[in-house]
Amino acid sequence: MDLHALVRDGEWTAKPVRAEWTAGGELLVEAREESDAWRTTSYGFVHDDAHALLAPLGPREAVEVTFVLDYKEQFDQAGVMIRVDETTWIKAGVEVSDGVAQVGAVVTHGVSDWSVAPVPEWVGRAVTVRASRDGDAVTIRARADEEPWRLVRVAPLSPTADARAGLFCCAPTRAGLAVRFLAHRRSEPDAALH
């Protein structure tokens, strides 16, 4: 499923301010101010209005999302989301935290957790986030341009869960975040963890 097929066949969890094709064939998605995905941990709130465009994800399938990392405000974020329901989901991508672009993931099973690692060298480049679902796990990798994949996270997900996956973005602290998505791909899951 390519980006055009995802737009045609996928469904938004929360409609963005706009989603439109650019002259260069990119999907430009503008996030609504205060949109986010988080459940309870440390902050004490629940947000379930991130802009995720999702389509069914099989129990042995991988999804990749490519976007341009050209945003810089606090908590601006984009990447890939796998969602079962409002209490079970994974989002992975690049989020700006305290002025630094951070690759990471939020894994939510009732409550959310968050892991990050700084990637300031990725700013201004095409970033691809890959979530590979197989067995009871989702393996998340990411890279800028054609660099080698970096392992970001291995997270649990029931092999029987009815999941949907695709691109997402959100802007918890501001209006005007517009993310340029370049690609969406589906493939076989990764053959090995390492």
Image (tube, helix red, strand yellow):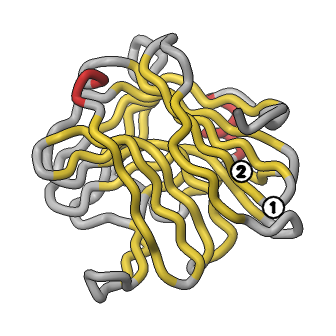
Specify whether 43 is left or right of 139.
left
Relative image position of residue 5 (x, y in whole percent): 70, 33
Q: Residue furthest front?
A: 194
Above-or-below relation of 118 to 17: above
Q: Which mark is residue 55?
A: 2
| Label 2 SS | strand
Crowding at mark 2 (Cα within 10 Å: few <14, some 14-19, many 20+): many
* Residue type beneath disc 2: Ala
Query: How many discs appear?
Result: 2
- The quarter of the picture where residue 48 lies is bottom left
**Residue 21 visible:** no
* Front residue of this view, candidates 60 and 66: 60
Viewport quadrant of the N terminus:
top right
Specify whether 86 is left or right of 106.
right
Q: CA distance from mark 1 to mark 2?
A: 20 Å
Q: Check if mark 1's residue and mark 2's residue have beta carbons within 8 Å.
A: no
Specify whether 25 is left or right of 7.
left
| Label 1 SS | loop
Residue under the point 46% across and 54% down: 105
Relative image position of residue 82 (x, y in whole percent): 63, 56
Q: Circle 1 is placed at which residue position? A: 136
Q: Which mark is residue 72?
A: none
Return the disc, 1 or 2, that comes first in the chain's sequence: 2
Relative image position of residue 77 (x, y in whole percent): 32, 47
Above-or-below relation of 11 to 18: below
Residue under the point 49% across and 49% down: 92
Relative image position of residue 152 (x, y in whole percent): 51, 43
* Front residue of this view, candidates 80 and 140: 140
* Front residue of this view, candidates 42 and 58: 42
* Residue type beneath disc 1: Asp
Q: Nearer the viewer, mark 1 or mark 2?
A: 1
